[in-house]
Amino acid sequence: MSAGTVLTLHSYKGGTGKTFTATNLAAALASEGKNVCLIDFDLRAPSLDKVFGTDGRKFWINDFLDGRCEAEDILADLSKVVKGKGSLHVALANPSMASIREAVTREKKWEMKALRRLIMFNEHLTQKMAMDYIIIDTNPGLSYSSINAVAAADMVLVVSSWDSSDLSGAQIMVKELYGMLEKHAMVLMNKIPASLLRDEAERKRMTSKLEASFNLPVIDLLPCDCEVIREEMSSILVLKKPNHPLSKSLVKVAHHIGKE
Ligand SMILES: Nc1ncnc2c1ncn2[C@@H]1O[C@H](COP(=O)(O)OP(=O)(O)OP(=O)(O)O)[C@@H](O)[C@H]1O
Ligand SMILES: [Mg+2]
């Protein structure tokens, strides 16, 4: 992926691991010296405030999309979290109930303006702040806002679970929506029962079958790991447990994305 690239994480169903993956990819890339901005574009169920804290935040991405503030007003510099050579900025979504209710009732006209504002924000991040990666975490499915996050991306990472309805829905979504938007996309399979991944030959067979059904490259198959579920929401696995097998896989995914 070239410098200043926008990567959106999307899925058909909820809970596939988009926020978990987006946070870990952002931390992995920033730890390795990249300038990264992570955007919570899940205005219907904000999550990154639970990971990074809100620290007296006055403005949110919602305010920027509404034209109520400037790009700089919504950015929190959390570079100290990664202790690396790079930087990590985060743009949070407003987690208040009033903002969530507002987000689900927005009309098409507002969403069209929001897409223009999101593109403007990304341009500010790449041109004025020299961001290498803008990572957008969005809500699942085909709401206007998640389609906006896909439309604004240079590359989409589809995070899919092993659930059959998620898989078939994601495959249709890729073909119809991403096809129409001509998006460069890749798939990350997550939360796969660990027992299915023990045999390398079986893993390769699964990967080829999935690549044929999605007609897209499958970067990796990540196991469902109960240790992750036990972790606090605020802990970032690649930083807290860099030697954990899932952290190593996530770092490899980050490298893979960097090469695209
Ligand atoms: N490989 C994994 N093994 C076990 N738990 C995981 C794994 N990946 C993510 N999780 C956990 O699954 C839960 C849901 O993950 P996450 O919030 O990232 O999903 P999401 O796709 O962002 O959900 P939503 O669509 O609701 O935004 C979290 O508790 C997360 O820590
Ligand atoms: Mg999420």
Image (cartoon, rainbow, N blue to C red):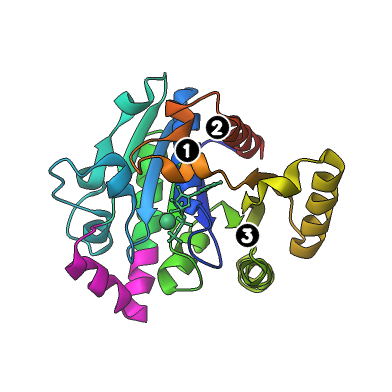
Label 2 SS? helix
Which quadrant is the C terminus positioned in?
Answer: top right
Q: Count all numbered tags in the image, as a single digit.
A: 3
Where residue 12 sits: x, y (%)?
Answer: 56, 67
Does the residue at mark 2 contact the one at mark 1 (Cβ under 8 Å)? yes
* Mark closer to the observer (2, 1): 2
Q: Specify the quarter for ligand 2.
A: bottom left
User: Magenta region, mostly helix, strand or loop?
Assistant: helix
| Residue 86 image offset from top left, x and y in percent | 41, 24
The residue type indicated by label 3 comes to Lys
Mark 1 sits on what residue?
24
Q: CA distance from mark 3 to mark 2?
A: 27 Å
90 and 180: which is toward the camera: 90
In the image, the segment drawn in magenta is 94-115
Separation of marks 2 and 1 at Cα, in angstroms: 8 Å
> Which residue is painted at 74% across and 49% down in the image?
196
Q: Which mark is residue 233?
A: none
What residue do we see at 72% from left, 47% from top?
195
Label 1 SS: helix
Residue that carries the numbered disc 2 in the rendered image: 247
x 35%, y 51%: residue: 121
Q: Left or right of 220: which side holds 54?
A: left
